[in-house]
Amino acid sequence: MSQLFYHLIYHEKTKRWLMMLDQFEENQTMTGKDLATKLSCTQRTIQSDIKQIKKYFDASILLLGGEDGYHFSLHHPVSYTKEKQALIDQEPLFFYADQLVSGTRKTNQEWAETLNLSPASFGRVKRQFVHLLEEQYQLTIVEKDNQLKGNEPAIRQFMYDLYFTLPLYPKVLEHRIKSWDSFYQLNKSGRWALDPIRLNQWCQLAQWRIGQGQYLPQKNGQEKGLERIVAALDETVTLSLPRQEKAALFLLSLNEEQFLNPLCQKEFIRQFSSEDGHNYLIMDFENMIVPFFETLIAIMHQFFQLSLSQTKEVLVEKQTEEKRFFDQLMKNYYGSKARFERSLVLTFQLTGSLVLQEWIKKNVRLYLQVKGFYLLEDIRPTPFNRQLIITNGGISQERPNVVWLSTIPEEREIKQALKEIDW
């Protein structure tokens, strides 16, 4: 689960339960000692929590074993998710955060009454939240009437993380998100691929903030670059927004997978780079990827996330921020590239009983996953994908990407047949 999610949970027991369930969902089997270490608590606390979790979730889960080893599985995923949601429905920080970005004005005393907390408890809740905002978003809260203040791109980033990245939502946020139900239909003629879901999400936030009279700042001297980016967005979707907002939407909605192709990187640089857009983060990497990311960071710096600074101290901080941003882009790129290179479109053309077919599929998937392949099934292969067809007698003509098995193969035959493929 995201770190923001845990920061928004005020009650320590609720946070511990959800962190424990997160561990179980990822690993299924955990010892009491490992859980205590990961959750920074005692094994006695783990034992007590396990008993209460079993009682609370009842028939929706199966949690067996003792502190030497617990095994977790789901019986009713829908009921389990609803019961998890109920744990956070009364957490005050979710509602407080939602109302802050809505512009609600209340004093500390009024907020304490609204949240049914004592003034001292609200003070602790607020301090926890202020620390989160300052640490992760460089935002603050005006003491008098609890107004959110800071750089507009930072406010929108916080809003995006709050409404679109959490693994679980209380009803107060769920109701807000459900009110944003329209998705823009993208045209086919655009040169650049945009993610329609991300475009809609950022557009909803932009329209909300504009309705409150808050716009992304405009910067002088960027007219040519701004026009190019706005034109690229207009090729794909029609929106009635200020140009600065359009530029940000285009950058925030770009589909990263298109840039696995070096030709797309080169075209992006050609279309959007400026003469002064490569004055930092010069590193010696292969192909086009470094100048591509330098170009992307430069225009993000101009139109959305990275703040300008004048003092020497803040300039050093800005360069560090740019370096972190660059490093994260490089990490994401190489992760996507590795995933793409190791992806495999897997198709089964099997005969025999359903039980036999499922057994063959299970063994094939297990072997390929252990070898580090990302398996794609039930999709149409493209010229850029590697395809593998598994059959136990269903294909008549010879093809290089087919693995032939006996009608009823043994496990070692499956492994040997897959080993002999020329990858």
Image (cartoon, rainbow, N blue to C red):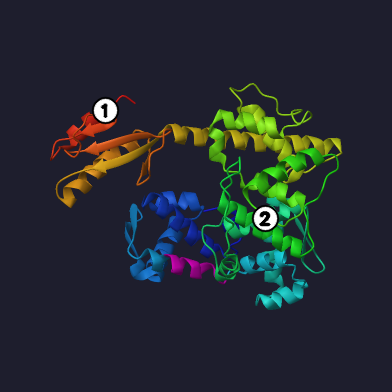
**SS at badge 2:** helix
The label nearer to you, 1 versus 2, is 1
Within 10 Å of disc 1 (Cα), the crowding (few <14, some 14-19, many 20+) is few
| Residue in view at x 72 percent, y 57 percent | 240
| Residue 184, magenta (yes or no) | no
Compared with 243, 213 (above or below) is: below
118 and 161: which is toward the camera: 161
**Amino acid residing under circle 2:** Phe
Task: Tell me how many marks there are.
Answer: 2
What mark, if any, has residue 419 been given in the picture? Answer: 1
Magenta part of the chain = 81-90
Residue 114 vertical placement versus 20 (above, below): below
Left or right placement of residue 401 versus residue 326 in this view? left
* Residue 15 against residue 374 in the figure, above or below: below
Q: Main secondary structure of the magenta part?
A: helix
Along the line of sight, the residue nearer the viewer: 402 or 104: 402
145 horizontally vs 9: left or right: right
Taking depth in this image into account, of 367 and 51 the one nearest to the observer is 367
- Is any atom of residue 387 visible in this view? yes
Q: Which residue is mark 2?
A: 158
Q: Left or right? Give the position of 313 relative to 126.
A: right
Where disc 1 sits, the SS reads: helix
Q: Work out whether residue 134 can be spotted.
A: no
Residue 380 location, x and y as percent?
A: 38, 43
Which residue corresponds to the image point at 52% horizontal and 61% vertical from the top-left?
168
Give the CA distance from mark 1 to mark 2. 48 Å
